[in-house]
Image: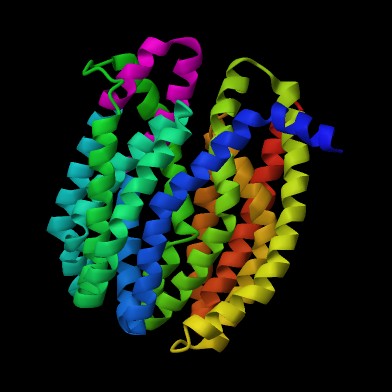
Amino acid sequence: MKKRIQNLYIKHKETIHNFIWRSLQIFGKQGVTFLIFIIAAKLLTPFEFGIYNYVLAVVFFLIIFGDFGISIAASNYVAEYNAIDEKKVRCVLFNSGIVILGLSSIVTLITIVFGKYFLSEKFVYVLWTLPMFFFALMTSLYDGIYRGLKRFERLSIISLITGFLSLGYVYYLIKNFGLLGALISQNIFYLLLFLVLALDYKDYDFIFNKEILKKITSYSLWIGLSNIGLFLYTRVDIIILGQFGFIEEIGYYEIINKIFIMILMPVTLLATVVAPNTAKNFALGRFDYIKDKIIKESLLLLLIGLLVSGLSFWIIPLIFKNFLEEYNLGLLILMLNLIIILVPFKFFSSYISIGYITPSGNVKILTNTLLIYGLLNITLDFILIHSFGFIGVIYATLISQFLFIITTDVYFYKKILTR
């Protein structure tokens, strides 16, 4: 048994090590943003917390258009070029950065000019987060390049150092400046992370390469559209709730959403680690190996997801009762019990989407299904909110996500297995 475990470790040594370092990196980056979220939930009133999450939902919607899939496309092509033409790797940062700078400038201008007409009194808070908008875009680009090069250890160290340095000012700003302090904390964190990454990464050339620019922008177009679809069937619920006047309930929704994301985080981390290998295996035509691997891993993740759902059903309500006593615990637990039904299915579905579909060059599959079910989610939101009130967004999410999982994974399996 011991020898078998050792052999498995040796066989998957690179993936295991990269997963550990990627996990530490996410703890440094996402862990701090999650810490800001937790501190804000505790220190702000439920109404202020709702506004906070509404504003961030708007900002992340803007980020979709500022990036439009460039960072993911850059990661994919860095992995590909690193396998077949290393000289082109040095040109990816500059050419990708040009596109992001142009897109972010356009989005910023449109937001400043027209934002007050759509966001009314919340517009001023969005203006406070515009620095975060730009620096989050650039850190995502660097993150994509590091992932493509499999520099998970380096990226992890940078994120951990930046994250730990951020802990002090996060609490101070939220404690003393409330909602505004929470937003400023996000700005400072992304600024620090951007500066450290920019100083650390030196493997680039300021050379305009039309071929690379065309490839990245062409592929990113489909990723950007899929990100819009993803937003339409996840975070758009927050904006719709805001339009219905459910400001305080937005905070409840985002607490459950954050928990859901944290539960899925190990799977998404693992998927980003295997993604460069997927791009390489597809480039080398190792389709039989991919077929066998994807089926075994999906079944294993489904079983693990069932176990995690059971543990979540038991443990998380205890955390609610001891930490969020000022919130409506009955509503939080009801939402939790509904959403964890998705966990086993999202375990393997998220893994396939991030680890196989996107890096294999089949992102059009995600784009089409995400847009279709994103629009379905919006339609269901309006219908079910009218019928069931706030909880209708949860029902809409369950329906649209189950349909997405079935359609996307079945189509991809069929496409790969019949190749």
Q: Quadrant of residue 387?
A: bottom right
Q: Which residues are magenta?
A: 66-95
* Rendered view: 176 above or below 303: below
Would you say residue 258 is visible in this rendering?
Answer: yes
Would you say residue 68 is visible in this rendering?
Answer: no
Q: Nearer the viewer, residue 359 or 12?
A: 12
Q: Nearer the viewer, residue 244 or 311?
A: 311
The image shows residue 367 at horizontal and vertical percentages of 51, 42
Q: Residue furthest front?
A: 2
Q: Quadrant of residue 48?
A: bottom left
Which residue is rendered at x = 52% and y = 84% of the image? 322
Which residue is rendered at x = 65% and y = 30% of the image? 13
Q: Quadrant of residue 205?
A: top left
The image shows residue 61 at horizontal and vertical percentages of 34, 55
Q: Tell me, yes or no, whether the highlighted magenta stretch contains residue 374.
A: no
| Relative horizontal placement of residue 124, taking residue 370 as reference (left or right) | left
Q: Nearer the viewer, residue 354 or 314?
A: 314
| Relative horizontal placement of residue 209, taking residue 229 as reference (left or right) | left
| Relative horizontal placement of residue 223, taking residue 137 as reference (left or right) | right
Which residue is rendered at x = 53% and y = 49% of the image? 370
* Magenta span dominant secondary structure: helix
* Rendered view: 319 above or below 364: below
The image shows residue 103 at horizontal and vertical percentages of 24, 40
